[in-house]
Amino acid sequence: MERKRLNAQPLALIRKIKGFTRSIVGDLARGSAPLIYIDRFRNYCTDTSGNCSCSSGLPAGKEAISLKRECHARRLDVLLRVLLIVQQLLQENRHGSKRDIYYMHPTVFKEQSVVDRAINDICILLQCSRHNLNVVSVGNGCIPLYSSYFLAGVCF
């Protein structure tokens, strides 16, 4: 993962991430199962300029995620793990790929598509692009290699 220049938006995203996790912990502390609503069939941001246009498309319903169903509990676990990684990327002003994130916990994530879905959900929840999360895509022919804590991609 490479270092990039710092801009003002990461601080706002870090605050949103902390607020989101704080609300989940608060629900658990009160003994109630967290309930998260995620808009579905909506175009999440892909604009690399950092301009979010999430609100330009209307959601076609919401999906409710709670701990009451095992598959939702697993999805929430993955979402929180990826959020932690994204928060670290933002705090350390580093960039990483979705593939890098997958290789941090391959036994937990099981498949790359699980990380891809979590990133999409985070973009929708935080109303930002993947680029704003400091998560980049890796081109074909790139192989992730382990570094000290994060991973780095090497292309051939």
Image: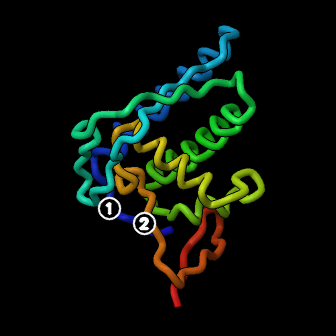
Residue 97 lies left or right of residue 80; in this view the side is: left
The colour scheme is rainbow
- The image position of residue 154, as x and y in percent, is 54, 82
Amino acid type of the residue tagged 2 in the rendering: Arg
Q: Which of the numbered marks, if any, corresponds to residue 58?
A: none
Find numbered disc 1 in the image and state the secondary structure of the residue it sits on: loop
- In the image, what residue occupies the spot 45% across and 67% down? 137
- The image position of residue 109, as x and y in percent, is 69, 53
- In the image, what residue occupies the spot 33% across and 46% down? 43
Mark 2 packing: few (<14 Cα in 10 Å), some, or many (20+)?
few
* Residue sitting nearer the eye, 78 or 37: 37
- In the image, what residue occupies the spot 29% across and 41% down? 54
- In the image, what residue occupies the spot 55% across and 29% down? 21
Residue annotated with mark 2 = 3
Residue 132 lies left or right of residue 111; in this view the side is: left
- The image position of residue 111, as x and y in percent, is 68, 59
Residue annotated with mark 1 = 5
Most extreme residue toward the right, as rendered?
A: 107
- The image position of residue 144, as x and y in percent, is 60, 75
